[in-house]
């Protein structure tokens, strides 16, 4: 376990005001980012049929929480994320080009390694928007990234008026860099170390093109082959002063079209997915072109509060070491 509490750390808000501020952040950010991206809120599933192929496979080794449904005669899985479901929903709900949806997504990732930023419980805003062939490019991706960063910074500015105790300063200026450029810049560091060094310098960054192998032969990070186009995706990072490291707030990207899905399934050795319902529709060009991603709700609260541990802003289950370290530091885990 990798829980670390900085020496002398104390939460800036008491327990009651923490709950008030969490609510304020979530309500405010939803308004900010949905307005900026022209998104409408929709209801979303907690689980999907295993046979549908709609669950997010993440890095491919994580085990979804599964259970049988006797009344249906099929097995279901708790979602890892709604990366694929959202794209199908845009088609089913008759969304037009330039419009999109967002939803509160709650997930269980049972194999997650626990540390200051990671929990087995995941809460995020999952969003997806229909784009045109003309906007399916890196320039449009960067525009959307900047809009999300501005929504985050606006939320931070607004909450500091209500809670003057909060002092987090965020940079609206996004530095864009590809994962290969990052490897070239820091060839002797691990991907995580590269992120920290780069974000330490730039404060707000978008690391692009994640999923494919770099010159070193390894990808910067894992990415499922069937939702992001690896040439037009990335992660949004901010610098977290309390922990002196980068915190990933969002994973997002322009989604695969039939050509990029075909290529990435082969590269990943996942050709068996071609027979799943969702993948057949995508390969046949039956789904709209989209851009989308997930924005961590608890991580956003951590960033704005300057929290040392994600358990300060969400209720989950923790290992003995984490509980003991937080107790010693006077931190109450929710």
Image (tube, grey):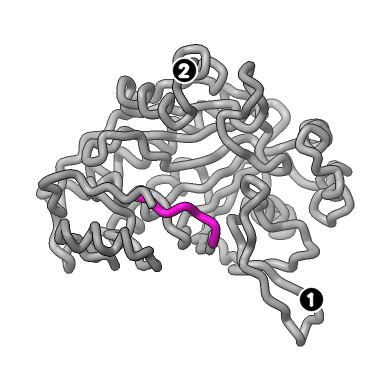
Residue 254 seen in the current view: yes
Q: Is residue 280 left or right of residue 39?
A: right
Q: Report the magenta residues as a range.
A: 110-115
Nearer to the camera, 235 or 272:
272
Nearer to the camera, 150 or 234:
234
In which quadrant of the rendered image does the C terminus lie? bottom left
Q: Is residue 158 above or below residue 216?
A: below
Q: Is residue 316 above or below residue 300?
A: below
- Whichever of callouts 1 and 2 sits on the residue coming sooner in the sequence is 1
Instruction: Name the residue that disc number 1 marks.
Output: 74
Q: Residues within 10 Å of mark 2 (few under 14, many from 20)?
A: few
Q: Residues within 10 Å of mark 1 (few under 14, many from 20)?
A: few
In the drawing, what numbered circle is on residue 129?
Answer: none
SS assignment at label 1: strand
**Residue 296 screen position, x and y as percent:** 43, 50
Q: Is residue 193 left or right of residue 207?
A: left
Dominant secondary-structure state across the stretch colored magenta:
loop
At 59% from the left edge and 43% from the top edge, which residue is drawn? 292
**Residue 47 screen position, x and y as percent:** 64, 68
* Alpha carbon separation for disc pair 1 and 2: 48 Å
In the drawing, what numbered circle is on residue 188?
Answer: 2
SS assignment at label 2: loop
Q: Is residue 157 left or right of residue 281?
A: left
At 52% from the left edge and 45% from the top edge, which residue is drawn? 38
Residue 112 in the magenta stretch? The answer is: yes
Q: Quadrant of residue 66?
A: bottom right
**Residue 200 screen position, x and y as percent:** 31, 25
Nearer to the camera, 111 or 198:
111
């Amino acid at each position: 376990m990798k829980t670390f509490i900085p020496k002398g750390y104390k939460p800036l808000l008491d327990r009651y005001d923490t709950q008030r501020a969490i609510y304020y952040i979530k309500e405010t950010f939803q308004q900010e980012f949905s307005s900026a991206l022209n998104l409408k809120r929709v209801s979303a599933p907690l689980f999907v049929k295993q046979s549908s192929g709609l669950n997010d496979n993440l890095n491919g080794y994580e085990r979804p929480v599964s259970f049988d449904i006797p009344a249906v005669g099929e097995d279901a899985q708790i979602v890892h994320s709604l990366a694929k479901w959202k794209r199908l929903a845009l088609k089913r709900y008759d969304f037009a080009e330039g419009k999109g949806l967002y939803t509160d997504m709650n997930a269980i990732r049972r194999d997650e390694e626990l540390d200051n930023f990671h929990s087995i419980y995941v809460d995020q805003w999952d969003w997806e928007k229909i784009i045109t062939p003309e906007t399916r490019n890196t320039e449009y991706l960067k525009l959307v990234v900047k809009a999300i960063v501005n929504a985050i910074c606006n939320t931070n500015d607004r909450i500091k008026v209500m809670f003057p105790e909060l002092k987090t300063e965020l940079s609206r200026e996004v530095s864009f860099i590809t994962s290969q450029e990052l490897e070239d810049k820091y060839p002797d560091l691990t991907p995580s170390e590269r992120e920290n060094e780069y974000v330490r310098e730039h404060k707000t960054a978008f690391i692009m093109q994640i999923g494919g192998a770099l010159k070193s032969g390894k990808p910067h990070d894992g990415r499922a082959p069937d939702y992001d186009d690896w040439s037009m995706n990335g992660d949004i990072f901010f610098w977290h002063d309390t922990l002196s490291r980068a915190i990933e707030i969002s994973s997002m990207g322009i989604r695969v079209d039939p050509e990029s899905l075909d290529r990435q399934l082969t590269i990943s050795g996942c050709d068996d997915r071609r027979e799943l319902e969702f993948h057949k529709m995508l390969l046949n060009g039956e789904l709209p072109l989209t851009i989308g991603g997930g924005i961590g709700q608890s991580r956003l609260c951590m960033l704005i509060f300057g929290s040392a541990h994600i358990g300060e802003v969400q209720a989950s289950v923790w290992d003995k070491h984490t509980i003991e370290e937080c107790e010693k530091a006077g931190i109450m885990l929710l």
